[in-house]
Amino acid sequence: MLLFLTAAIPGEDLALLNGFYERFGGAMFRAARRYVQNDADAEDVVHDVFSALAESFIPALRDKDDEARLRFLLVCAKNRAISFSSRQSRIVPVPSPMLSKAFVHADDELAERMDDRALVRKLLGALDGMDPLYSDALFLQLEGASVKEIARLLGEKPETIKKRLHRARKLLRGAITEQGGTEE
Amino acid sequence: MNIEALFLEVYGKRLDAEFAEAIAAAEAEPYRFSPRFEERMQALLQSGRPAAKRSVPIRRILWIAAAAVLVLCSLAFTSKRIRSSVAGFLVQVFGDHVEYSDPEITKMAIEEEYGLVPVPEGFVEYKTIKTEDYICIFYVKGENTMLCLKQRASSNVSESVDNEHGVFEEYGINGKTVLIYLTETTAHAAWTEDGYYFSLAYTSVSQVDLDQIIDYISSVAVK
């Protein structure tokens, strides 16, 4: 990939960014397109995510495998698209994991495989009742992004992200302890 | 197992299921991004700099504003000469960039595809973006050098060129007038020819060799 001296971020990060666009740009577009009204808006979303990464690269992405990087970038594109749509006062179709048989299937298989099935079930229950925007923010944070970085990536204020993270952790903790559980 | 690690595993599976459709669609039917988008992305991915929202110290803003006023004042006296001498496109100077627009061209669609003929030694044709009235070909040499040739057949176009770190000069090359913007490691050339508007951008990590750039421009021909 192409490296250039004038880059605002180090050359190796810029090379990574080029690779991300080549490999994941299309999927990011598709993920964003579900939430915005036209292709041009989805393209803007993809551009905005890459702009945010160019402004400040997420160090945690350097050591991840492509699968994890793709997941991370798709979450960014999705959230950015939702934020974009909501600013334009459109009705935003936020997908409910409960409605998808695929999710249920994947969850069942996971619960079977994990040692503490009860804990997995509680976690899944907590996720079912959680706004995906909260769980997405928590996911990005646990993947290594800071509050500021998440805010920049999603085009939100840091305070908004802090609130989402607080709500996500509270709901998660509550669901796991309330059901007679084994909090960490 | 740590609850956070468990969350990552469980939620990761959910995300995989949620995005499976988008990933499959992207693989089965790759989306063709618009030329405008590709242009913006290439600028971003080459420079590593976001297009907007740069925080600039007040002192620098004042310097830029003063420089812009001077440039605009001088342009007021010379714009007519520049417009007529750049062989067919309008040059507008802004604070941090120069914009080329309204090329006087006769073709409204791409009738013949141009390229670098032959492809310069060491370069390979890397990517082509094509529409009815626009072609953009990227040539790369190793990991550090790139040429981007654009051919446009619509007069309703504009192109921005950074003007902060280099100089603009006009050159007569093979009977056509070419406006070249040069920095230490980049060059941008623009001209009109055979009814089309052309631009050739060169970026590298090493010093620009003007003679080499002129050779590249000379080699632009129908493929």
Image (cartoon, rainbow, N blue to C red):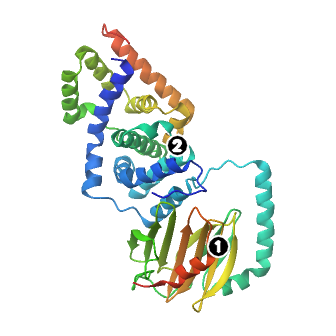
**Residue tagged 2:** A57
Instruction: State whether residue B126 is above or below residue B214.
Output: above
Q: Is residue B78 left or right of residue B223?
A: right
Question: Mark 1 to mark 2: distance in Å?
Answer: 30 Å
* Residue B19 appears in the figure: yes
Mark 1: amino acid? Tyr
Residue that sits furthest to the bottom in the current view: B175
Q: Is residue B217 left or right of residue B1?
A: right
Label 1: chain? B
Which residue is at a point 26% across and 46% down the rendered structure image?
B21
Which residue is at a point 77% across and 70% down the rendered structure image?
B71
Q: Quadrant of residue B30?
A: bottom left
Residue that sits furthest to the front in the current view: B122
**Residue tagged 1:** B181
10 Å crowding of disc 2: few (<14), some (14-19), many (20+): many
Which residue is at a point 67% across and 87% down the rendered structure image?
B84
Q: Position of residue B104 (x, y in %)?
A: 56, 85
Q: Position of residue B206 (x, y in %)?
A: 59, 64
* Residue B103 appears in the figure: no
Q: Position of residue A3 (x, y in %)?
A: 52, 56
Q: Position of residue A19 (x, y in %)?
A: 42, 52
